[in-house]
Amino acid sequence: MKHLQTFAVLALFLLPFGLQAKWVFFQNHLHSHSEHTFSRFPHSTDLERSYDVRGIETLMNLALENNVQALAITDHNTIAHWFEPMFSKDAEVVLVPAMEWTNMFGGHATLIGFVANDAKDAIVPMNPRATVSEDMYQDMVQKTHDRNGFVIINHPTLMYAWQQWPNHLYGADAIELNFHFFMRPQATLDWWQEKLALDHKVYLVGGCDYHVGGNFVSPFESINYIDVLDPAQSKDVVDALKQGRLIVLRNASSPKIEFTAYNALGEVYQMGETVKLNALQSLMVQVKVHEGEGHTLHLWTKTGEKQHMKISSNDFKIFFPYVFQNETDFIRFEIRKNNSLEAVTNPLFVQR
């Protein structure tokens, strides 16, 4: 494979990244309880029992201990927890309104930031114990979008085949990457790459599926490092998700990566955005990796992995030109160590 260093230029005078936002840790797909009863028997579980206030407090305390600034608590088929006072008061940990659309025999999805005025406004399956049809997936995504929400496909390739997502996106906005082996993270990454190569503009979001009281996963594995204007505002966190301004990390100690691109006019583009180029234009790409010495940086495009190079320091910077070969394309980056995935950026999309 051609190595990135064969054309990379180490920049002596790097252009500024121009980021006015703040990078913070955001964790997605958390549950305040260890039970799944509300997803399986929605008519026999009262709304006030569909979540656990003490579990929410536990998650917030864990977040404070681990320097995590925002959480999406995604209890099953309920938004009753959104109307707890802790969701509206100022706090050191921001609670982003979210829920998990959950079925016994079908795919699951995190729904984030949709408009709701009452606990009964949750977007739920008609029968969580029944097999999910195509029109049910489409209906859920459409309802969420109509209410200004964001849809993340959860654990699409997990080992429980009966809870895998079908091979269609149905208009979902993002795919969850969970690093736990049971969720088959490489299969998820392959599926995402396949959808990107088919010109779907779909983002990647980390999620851990942690249940308070459970020990199956860690609450802060598969975490997001998100580029948000004001981390104290849940709306700004949701907006950053909708714009794909995040990288997914194995954990908080994984290397952090930022990249920007510049056209001939000096206009700056970041991951999640779409750049329009003419047939003769290329982009100058700037990459910074923090605390990644000894890891490997991999560049991916529509046609697969293009180059890779060793990260030689903990304050690593490269600046290089890239010419896109296709009418529609993208660039994204992965960081690996001994082929173990540690970090993934969202793409910068290109159109001619």
Image (cartoon, rainbow, N blue to C red):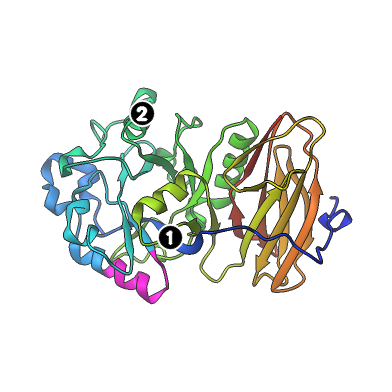
Residue at the (41%, 68%) spot, across then down: 68
* Amino acid found under the numbered disc labelled 2: Gln
- Left/right placement of residue 139 relative to residue 275 reads left
Where residue 3 appears, as percent x and y from the top left, is: 84, 55
Where residue 218 appears, as percent x and y from the top left, is: 42, 66
| Element under disc 2 | helix
Q: From which residue to which does the magenta span run? A: 58-69
| Element under disc 1 | strand
**Residue 291 vs residue 277, the one in the foreground:** 277
Residue furthest front in the image: 265
Where residue 148 appears, as percent x and y from the top left, is: 35, 37
Residue at the disc numbered 2? 142
**Residue 202 vs residue 1, the one in the foreground:** 202
The answer, for residue 325, to whether it is visible in the render is yes
Q: Please tell me whether residue 288 is drawn above or below residue 242 in the rendered image.
A: below
**Residue 319 vs residue 70, the one in the foreground:** 319
**Residue 4 vs residue 100, the one in the foreground:** 4
Is 64 magenta? The answer is: yes
Is 226 magenta? The answer is: no
Residue at the (41%, 73%) spot, across then down: 66
Where residue 173 appears, as percent x and y from the top left, is: 46, 38
Q: Main secondary structure of the magenta part?
A: helix
Residue furthest top in the image: 135
- Left/right placement of residue 46 relative to residue 186 reads left
Residue at the disc numbered 1? 26
- Left/right placement of residue 67 relative to residue 146 reads right
